[in-house]
Amino acid sequence: MNEVAGRRSRSGGGASRRAERTAISFETARFIQRNIPNFEILNEEALQIIEHNAETVLEEIGVNFVENPAALARWRDAGADVQGERVHIPRGLARKLISTAPKSYTQHARNPERNVEVGGRNLVLAPVYGPPFVRDMEGGRRYATLEDFQNFVKLGYMSKWLHHSGGTVCEPTDVPVNKRHLDMLLAHMTLSDKPFMGSVTEPSRAQDSVDMASILFGKDFVQSNTVMTSLININSPMVFDGIMMGALEVYAANNQASIVSPFIVGGAMAPVTVAGTLTQVLAEILAGVSYSQLVRPGSPVVAGAFVTSIDMNSGAPTFGTPEAAHITYGAGQLVRRLGLPYRSGGSFCGSKLPDAQAAYETANSLNMALLAGVNFMLHACGWLEGGLVSSYEKFVMDADQLGTLHHLAQGIQIDENGQAMDAIREVGPGGHYLGCAHTQANFKSAFWRSDLLDYKPFETWAEEGSRDTQTLANERVKKLLADYQAPEIDPGTREALEAFVARRKAEMPDAFI
Amino acid sequence: MNEVAGRRSRSGGGASRRAERTAISFETARFIQRNIPNFEILNEEALQIIEHNAETVLEEIGVNFVENPAALARWRDAGADVQGERVHIPRGLARKLISTAPKSYTQHARNPERNVEVGGRNLVLAPVYGPPFVRDMEGGRRYATLEDFQNFVKLGYMSKWLHHSGGTVCEPTDVPVNKRHLDMLLAHMTLSDKPFMGSVTEPSRAQDSVDMASILFGKDFVQSNTVMTSLININSPMVFDGIMMGALEVYAANNQASIVSPFIVGGAMAPVTVAGTLTQVLAEILAGVSYSQLVRPGSPVVAGAFVTSIDMNSGAPTFGTPEAAHITYGAGQLVRRLGLPYRSGGSFCGSKLPDAQAAYETANSLNMALLAGVNFMLHACGWLEGGLVSSYEKFVMDADQLGTLHHLAQGIQIDENGQAMDAIREVGPGGHYLGCAHTQANFKSAFWRSDLLDYKPFETWAEEGSRDTQTLANERVKKLLADYQAPEIDPGTREALEAFVARRKAEMPDAFI
């Protein structure tokens, strides 16, 4: 049995190692390869107006690269007009610089079957990122801990429709701020075998991420392959801060991918109109992506757009709104015209609970992201309360819904089997198709089926306790965590990772802000 | 005050009439006029294959018109090959016949401001149709009564984003089967001033509908204008029964619109593949719509597609699935190529409760219907448990979400104000837009805002009782029903309608099956 289950193990021996080698592997779907068109909301004239205006913003207004003299020097050398920290980028320069960025790239996972292709017609799904709180049915809302973090990595690993382990699935607030990234990376690297993200909160933490990845994949492999995709936010409007850009510089220099992404609540960090927001988003993408190419031409980069609207009464950000959809569709068209991979979308909602509001808003967001041509969807499951909370129940609810995107993206089969003329002939007027040969041959694969939602007869459902979706999800979370088994890993590699974490923690005093 | 509030009243006098004339009118949005493209999932080759196959079905396999000798005679006269009840329609004949059907038509409401245009780039939204049960938070699931029916008509009247009062918003099971339609029509005609649907369950009930509409609008008006759009289901696969066709004949003869609609659970009433289902749907639409034109050339007709998938484990119909989306998108393309108005979509879900499952499935369905180019959406709000239940809470939850479709359909403003270059110049890098002139000028109309969902800070929300969406909706239902005021109606007209209902009821013994 060991020989079969453990045949991919690179070393052997020892009782604890034997347990690892018998670990089962959970099924993961291949990243989505679209066989359907994108939804194109802007016409050619509108696209050209926005593109022209974005170049006007870069040239006339300019963008700020703050606390980063090296960046200003790079811009000056490239031909920009630099005044103080303000960089005016002549019309056309940014477009020229980004031409060296790859149209798509492979992000390697330690399990090669789980490598992902970011770009083209593909869609890669990664979980929620960043919440300081978690929520579940029993414990309510509370600060997230490292144990929560590890639980979410486990859930992500076991989610069939999730291709990517993500990054900060929640903030482990019980670990010092300056050491969290080490525990987070260790969890992604050992509890899952899906691809993951690196730390961006200090350039030194980006370097730790590269160093740990070099232990996991080998140093040479990391220098010639992309093994991390990390999230670099722009301080909209039009400010690129030294810390985030410092992390981008580390990743670009090491051939690792960055998502360069405006983070915008419309009406606050961008104009209140959609076309105005798209103009600013495009200007920020042009500046940020071209800067990545100034650091290292050819380094992989994803153009992001995290944009939502605002409630005019309370000032709260709102999600799943029509304006967010407009921007997501429009930004997709603009990014495709740049020839870059596109990051947007997510399981966005403002609701405090994984209730109907959460699901309406999330479904609105997921559907628009698929049709908008998104290539990398961060926050694809688990997002609650405007991103303040990682929800256990919503994580598995959303992860189940991601299956619908896979099936939608397959498009419509039009071959002879798809046409089903023999079935229509066989059944004829007034008949039924349940027993016909064509139905029997196609039944299992014909329809997407939820692994979570309720399809039972009313009486059965009532007898079983009239459970709502949140209750079903709560039971599923418990079952998944109870069934979890870690993917096998070379014990020497794990020991080296643990030693690195221990050493780096010992080198630094604890910091909590 | 009477003069202002009652100025549209056609007659006056009497204390009870004075009360009516002071009734307030609730705001209703104009039907959706799309300024965004449709989503086209099938390419030209696939469309031609399906169109060719549908004609093959009509010619080679044929369709059944059962218990309807007059229909068989009409088909024979039109050139079809009729054998028993089977009608073989030669390739091209159905397409030729439907060329007399209007591309769009006006359905008049008794309040002319609420007339709707069915067809073109428009989308008209109507509530759930047909459930024998209702559900609310206090009473749970129970058989629907006439009081429930009246409540749902009131809620529909007060729903800003609902353009149409619908038909059987629930089955009033406390009224004899053969008399229900009279009470239902009276409720739509007196408790609302939005357009409505006629009865289809017997040809005589269709005639009662025409007769009551003639009292409400005037007989001449009804003969030269469309004042009802009624739902004629096809017994898929490919059976047109005498009762439904008899109702269609009454409506067509009186210039009233019918929705000719396959009702399909894929894998049971149509092939298990999407292209096969689309072929059958198109064949059924071609046969049904062309039959309406045989009865009266030029009579208004809508091509429908109610199609969903099936759960392979339980056999239950499933909703909000990717396959339903494929069919809805594809059928939209096929119907547009016929030059007909298109009915599909709805607030479909299989969930027993208005919970997250209900909202995911509903949002999936609503979004696809908007992008599929649907012109008439029945079931746009209130559908629960596979259509067995009209849910009070879900009615107002869905009706609120319909606002997102209105805003999505507006598309992106690309004029100077939309471009917002002055705002970007004014704010600059590192600034914020909340106070700028452009934001102030556009803030109120820029973003869609829910009238129901929770946008409050966490602390406020917690202090107010941590209400979920269902609880918020329950409170809204109660407030709406408490605030309801009937639209004004000419008292003589109402008395005539009531007299007609009393007379017809007296003419028939009660029937409960």
Image (cartoon, coloured by chain):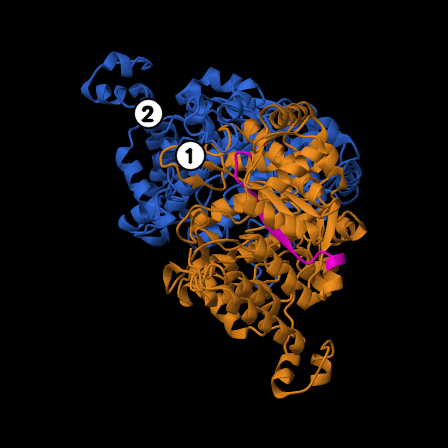
Chain colours: A orange, B blue
* Residue most extreme to the left: B15
Which of the two residues, A361 or B188, is positioned nearer the viewer here?
A: A361
Q: Quadrant of the N terminus of chain B?
A: top left
Q: Residue at x 27, y 19 (%)?
A: B21
Q: Secondary structure at mark 2?
A: loop
Between circles 1 and 2, the one closer to the viewer is 1
Residue B511: x %, y % from top left: 40, 46
Disc 2: which residue:
B487
Q: Residues within 10 Å of mark 2 (few under 14, many from 20)?
A: many
Q: Which residue is mark 1?
A: B449
Q: Nearer the viewer, residue A335 or B436?
A: B436
Q: CA distance from mark 1 to mark 2?
A: 26 Å
Q: Is residue B288 visible?
A: no
Is A139 placed left or right of B279 in the picture?
A: left
Label 1: which secondary element? loop
Q: Position of residue B22 (x, y in %)?
A: 25, 20
Q: Which residues are magenta?
A: A223-238
Is residue A156 left or right of B487 when viewed as pictured? right
Image coords of residue B217 (percent x, y): 42, 19
In this rendering, the answer to whether B356 lies above or below B334 is below
Residue B353 percent coordinates (x, y)? 42, 54
User: Tag 1: Cα neighbours inside 10 Å, few (<14), some, or many (≥20)?
Assistant: many
Is B330 or A381 nearer to us in this picture? Answer: A381
Disc 1 and disc 2 on one polypeptide chain = yes
Going 73% across and 77% down the picture, which residue do you hit?
A: A10
